[in-house]
Image: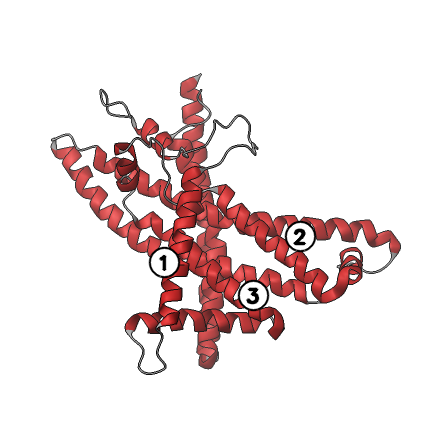
Amino acid sequence: MAAEHAPTASEYIVHHLSFLTSAKQTSLVDWSVFHIDTLFYSTILGLLGVFVMARLAARATSGVPGRFQAAVEIIIEMVADQAKGIVHSPESRKFVAPLALTVFVWIFLMNAMDLVPVDLLPMAGAAVGIDYMRVVATADLNATLGMSLGVLLLCIYYSIKIKGFGGWMHELFTTPFGAHPLLWPVNFSMQMIEYVAKTVSHGMRLFGNMYAGELIFMLIALMGAAWAGTLGSGLLWIGHIIAGTIWAIFHILIITLQAFIFMMLTLVYIGQAHESH
Amino acid sequence: MEGNIVGFVALAAGLIIGLGAAGACIGIGIMGSRFLEASARQPELMNTLQTKMFLLVGLIDAAFIIGTGIALWYTTANPFIK
């Protein structure tokens, strides 16, 4: 950012909402553009989660567990319980329950990047020549929709695996209204709408929450940037600390809740794929 | 002309946040009261219901928070002014 003038509020927000892209985006859907920051942070956090869990699993004891092991055991038990209640086939659960755990831990870690001060990592990046950086990977629609598309593919996979291709086709054309041939197009379009709505709302929900949370953190940071030595700006500066603390505490709830909801909906959608009508 | 747009966008942001908040609060209020009623009647179900209640809180809240995010985006980095 240019040093000769301080950015205005709009410039600050727009700058902080710009991704580090591999190329300039020319249209709304541009497949040649990669968001390097999103890819970087999601990969790093995914590896971190896997690494920590694997290390813990390697030295887990059956005796008195340490604090960290107990915490991980609580999470695993919680996910396993939810999976047991929603996905009834034990064979699928061998894959689906670890998937749900991965989704939960990964999304939680990516959401938790929201709690890092908004300017810390972008400024560190700017110091080494990276001008744009967004640290919250789940505040990128591409990341969340990518994950929900993955869930959609799994739903289709399990639909075909459990009911057979014919059975799935039969379901697509005969539910929800009935098997009469006149109703086939209606049924099919209803099913398609359901699949699209499920997938889009699944990804949008996580994205919207994280995006709004990030934006509010930036607005709070703007309050702090108003510091100019006068009394009013000093009060604003104190206000930004108070507001930031309150929002961060509230946000701990939101990031956990959104990770939990994404995990639960993953389980519910895959569970639905197992039920035949 | 630009002043007009700024005014309209400010009104729109107020409506987005206000109506969204009203809807979400009414929804969560109704659900919370039902949850309390249900757990007063059957305290042993409280834990299972609580999980589901939090899930639904997140679902209800999502639309409102998405709206708030969009409204804040409009107010801070107005896309309608070129």
Residue receiving disc 3? A96
Q: Nearer the viewer, residue B17 or A47?
A: A47
Front disc: 1 or 3: 3
The residues bearing labels 1 and 3 have C-alpha atoms spaced at a distance of 25 Å
C-beta proximity under 8 Å, tags 1 and 2: no
Tell me which amino acid carries mark 2: Glu
Q: How is the image coloured?
A: secondary structure
Question: How many numbered badges does the structure rendering display?
Answer: 3
The answer to which of marks 1 and 2 sits earlier in the sequence is: 2
Residue at the far front in the pictured view:
A58
Q: Are marks 1 and 2 on the same chain?
A: yes
Residue A253 marker: 1
Q: On screen, B55 above or below A210?
A: below
Residue drawn at 26 percent across, 47 percent down: A244
Q: Position of residue A153 (x, y in %)?
A: 63, 53
Is label 2 in a helix, a strand or a loop? helix
Q: On screen, A61 above or below A110?
A: below
Crowding near the residue tagged with mark 3, few <14, some 14–19, many ≥20 C-alpha atoms within 10 Å: many
Q: Position of residue A16 (x, y in %)?
A: 35, 34
Tell me which amino acid carries mark 3: Val
Residue receiving disc 2? A194
